[in-house]
Amino acid sequence: MQPGGVGEPSDFPSATLFDDSIYQREALSLPESKNEDDLDQEILEEAQQLGIAVSQYLAPDPHDISTALSTFTVSSEPRSSMSVRSHESHSTGFTSDPSRNSKDQCVENHPASPSFAPPRSSISIENRGFSVDGPRPAMRHAHSSSTTSKAGSTRSLLLVSESPGLKRRRGSSLLSMFRRESQQCSSCSARVRHSHHVNPFTPRLLCGHSLTKYAIRIHVQDALERHDHAPPSCCGRPLPRPALEMALTEAELDSLAKALPLSGEAETGIHTKASEESAVEFTSQAESQSLVSPAESGPPSPSHPVKTPEECARLEKAMEDERFRALRTLQTEQLNKIVSFEARQRQALLLYYEQSRSKLSSALARNKAERTNQHAQHLEQLEEMQVAAEHDLRRAQVQENQNMATALKYMEAYCNGPNSSEHTVSEEDRKKLKRQHVVQDSLPRKHDSAINVLRSKQEKDVKVQIHNQHTELVQMDLDFEKEMEQLEMKFHKDSSKLDVLAEVRRGKAIARWDLKVEIWRRQFEKQQETCFDGSIPHPDWPATPTEEPAGDTTALAPYFQLQHHSAAAT
């Protein structure tokens, strides 16, 4: 059996679907003695040897999809009992790494000022028909090339207040990020938190700030509360539409567009070339959790927002390097492997649940057929018992007729026989004889009545038996529907969980490749004694897998065989 393989399809969801070892072998092509953490550590050590400053602490965003993966349940519908305003006077307890800047930021983010309004108990804030605190939609299964789904971009922004005790955890994962110095925005609200760590889920703006989704919502709310009808902005620059799409749903964006006259840059994100680069940076950082060093790939500064032709030429020339082209080829191959592995996972999941549904349907049909046959046998047995009971009753009636006739014969002989003169026949004896004749004449009616009563009782017993059998079959249908609903809920749960897991894995893969590209950049600059600015774009994720399923070579092969078994059975 292959590593991480399974023996029976019934243990598929827990033992195979989310098994990291299968992903590491088939998608990352790692040997059995090596896992993803080892790969991350190797890249980190190589980066540190080149002087690339890599943070040793993760900066967990409260809206991280990994949080959704660890707390995902079937009934985990997004609910929020606090409004955006309710965070004004509540400390989240979520602080950055201990550093020289932590105390300053703590003072800036939580000033002891009486200007803070008391927390409100309202559910949401509505202004001009725009609801800031909107619920996040449920996650959907998606095959698109984007690693950040619509559900992921609209995840709830209120988890910070619900989990005030979150602390940073130490790890060697490639989701660590380069340290960047924070910039203070004098024009932004004091309640907006500007992160000095670059979190892959909080991309940077043109002004240099990294806004969380919660901070973006606060900017939107501040813009709605102002009377100048200015679009949401940070440091005087309108927030680009990709940034708004990270925190708002489509309905909220439409409401915002109606409430405020968004500028061309905020509305389309392509007002200028710098705006295009900003939109691209937002999309790439949010989808791939980029870890490019700020020294070479930071956001364009206000004094130098657009790359010059010379810089573009140096960048293009650098990208023609053989080592870079080989690196890019390996990256493209691995992206294709990951997409193909995800396709196999989804196909295996679908086949497993289709087989489970088919098994439930077959079991229902088989059980109903068996019970129907048993019911027919029970009815036959009941009818046989009823026939036997009627036969016994009729035989008893015949015996009663014979006994009555014999008794009447002796009474007739006693009262009216030839030897009646030998004894005295009283009037009472003659009355008894007369009553005996009356009883004999009433026997047929008595017997018919007894037969009718017996048949009525038997008919009632048959109706009760049929009713009980019908109730049993109906209950089997109800139990089947309940099992199907539970199976459907579990399928949606596993499918959504698989999407989140794929999103996390894609982000980590892109983070590794971005760091590899950064390592190549440092080595190239050192070798060529040159320097070039600008971020290096990475290839897009394939929209569809470019290779066929691995068949028997994959650990998921037992579940692809379910399709053949189903076809053979039909």
Image (spheres, rainbow, N blue to C red):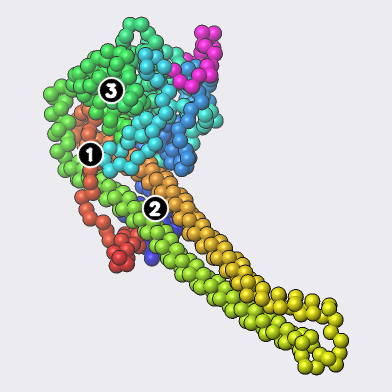
Asked if the stretch drawn in magenta spans residue 116, the answer is yes
Q: What stretch is highlighted in magenta?
A: 106-125
Q: Is mark 1 on a helix, strand or loop?
A: loop
Can residue 432 be seen here? Answer: yes
Q: Nearer the viewer, mark 2 or mark 1?
A: 2
Asked if the stretch drawn in magenta spans residue 516, the answer is no
- Camera-side residue: 299 or 128? 128
Q: Residue furthest front?
A: 421
Q: Is the magenta stretch mostly helix, strand or loop?
A: loop
Q: Name the residue under label 2.
A: 17
Between the C-alphas of marks 3 and 2, the distance is 36 Å
Residue 255 image-quadrant placement:
top left
Category of crowding for the residue at label 1, using alpha-carbon neighbours closer than 10 angstroms: few (below 14), some (14–19), many (at least 20)? few
In percent of width and height, residue 83 lies at 48, 21
In percent of width and height, residue 488 lies at 41, 49
Give me the disc on residue 241: 3
Contact, mark 1 vs mark 3 (Cβ under 8 Å): no
